[in-house]
Amino acid sequence: MKISTSYSWRSFWIGVWCCLALGISTSAFAQALPDFKSLVKEAAPAVVNISTVQRANTQEAFDPFSQFRGPGGDEIPEIFRHFFRGFPEQAPRRGAPAPRSLGSGFIISEDGYLLTNHHVIQDAEKVIVRLSDRREMEAKVIGSDARSDVALLKIEAQDLPYVKIGQSQSLEVGEWVLAIGSPFGFDHSVTAGIVSATERSLANDTYVPFIQTDVAINPGNSGGPLFNLAGEVVGINSQIYTRSGGFMGLSFAIPIDVAMEVSNQLKGQGYVTRGWLGVVIQEVNRDLAESFGLDKPMGALVVKVMEESPALAAGLREGDVILRFNRQIINQSSDLPHQVGRIKPGERVALEVMREGRRQTLRVTIGTLPSEEELARTSSTEPEISSQPALGLRVEPLTSEQRERWSVSAGVVVAQVEEGVGAAAGLMVGDVITMLNGQRVETPQDFYEIAANLPKNRAVPMRIVRRGSPLFIPLRPAP
């Protein structure tokens, strides 16, 4: 087949132009990427490896993969609270204590103070810090806080390299960040990525608004620093989200603002105090938002006010929806503990709540957060809520035994759930109804009278106590 000369030359020059354009585009793309070399050279000397010596019985039972296994030995939980426990540097002899590499840390002052995770040094008999120049020193634990997973250590040395502390509150989604640590014992390994979310709440970590990134984090990175492009520490790497036991694109860091607040208290008094409001809360879904007169789902719905709590003293009620705390908007219920925990006990702040369809402002004097043991005696964990609407049942008065068993002073117990609105709502026999559409229910007569006058085809809130756990469910009576 004959091809014209003009067509051949045209194709040739088009190819040349495409190659040049591709080269220019690739070069421009490369220039747009950040250069981490100077950042790493400046910051890496302040990053350390941390290992511990455990008691003999702990060493004998140590299984480096135990934190990856579920109860059956095969299942892997999706979020590992202590995922970053590392591997032993050498196999310990039976009954003999030996150091094992657990994680990373970073020096925050030239006189030897450094930060890491609480779970890295938890239950350690001895903590060993290895510096970038290969020196090893035993560290003193100044203090450790399980609720924030932050630990403050001290080594006896002077003129040490130390990191610059940034401000995590100024981080933005999409911003480049870099981690330096000791994954699997490989000191000063560098990984980079971007911030994929901020103020992320995780299960069992009520008081930490995590920074979410896609920086590759693995066992041994825990406790290491997360840097911004200015070379400032903005977080402490702590957790990952995984289904396989390895990095899957989601890692979480403790904001440095939170970590420094904790470390300052640990240094000053050896323990951490946090603000306490004294309520059990739940999320507000679409139907609940409608039932409480809100334009959209937002806020923290109060399902229980604890006895002798700041909330009770301030006049907060079950059924109130907290919309603002100390002038900060509460978009989700998980936002509230973050805000309350950072208020100093004794400080007086304003609460904006939605009560019976109207916005009100209350003043509350924040208390001191009790210990986990004290909270367990006075409260229950946040209950799961039904996603279905509700109503249509037979109720009976509470017996003295039921009142004592569920710690309920008033209400009616569901004796029978018939086919209809109640069954569709997920109500169960044994549920205790204490409030309906903002009105307290103390007797079966109260319940039937209130139910008879409910607005039609509009969601209304019902407060129940199910096996000791209070929660609100939305009801939508049939038209």
Image (cartoon, helix red, strand yellow):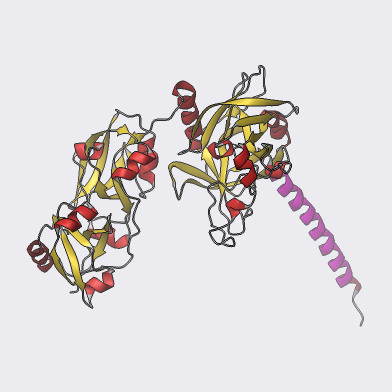
Is 389 placed left or right of 71 in the picture? left
Q: Is residue 360 above or below residue 269?
A: below
Q: Give left or right: position of 471 versus 61.
A: left
The reply, left or right, for residue 40 in relation to residue 228 is right
Tell me where residue 383 sits by quadrant. bottom left
Looking at the image, the residue that sits furthest to the front is: 95
State the quadrant of the N terminus: bottom right
Q: Residue at x 68, y 45 (%)?
A: 87
Name the residue located 45 percent from the left edge and 50 percent from the top edge.
Answer: 203
Identify the residue shown where x is 44% and y is 23%: 269
Residue 166 magenta-drawn? no
Quadrant (top left, top right, bottom left, bottom right) of the C terminus: bottom left
**Residue 44, percent from left and from top:** 70, 32
- Foreground residue, 475 or 26? 475
Expressed as whole percent of the image width and height from the top left, the position of residue 427 reads 26, 67
Q: Is residue 214 visible?
A: yes
Front-most of residues 267 and 235: 267
| Position in image of residue 34 (x %, y %) | 68, 41
Residue 178 picture location, percent across and down: 64, 40
Question: Where is 106 relative to 205, above or below?
Answer: above
Magenta stretch: includes residue 9 = yes
Residue 227 makes an appearance in the image: no
Quadrant location of residue 307? Answer: top left
Judging depth in this view, the residue of 468 and 341 nearest the camera is: 468
Name the main secondary structure of what is drawn in magenta: helix
Q: Which residues are magenta?
A: 7-33
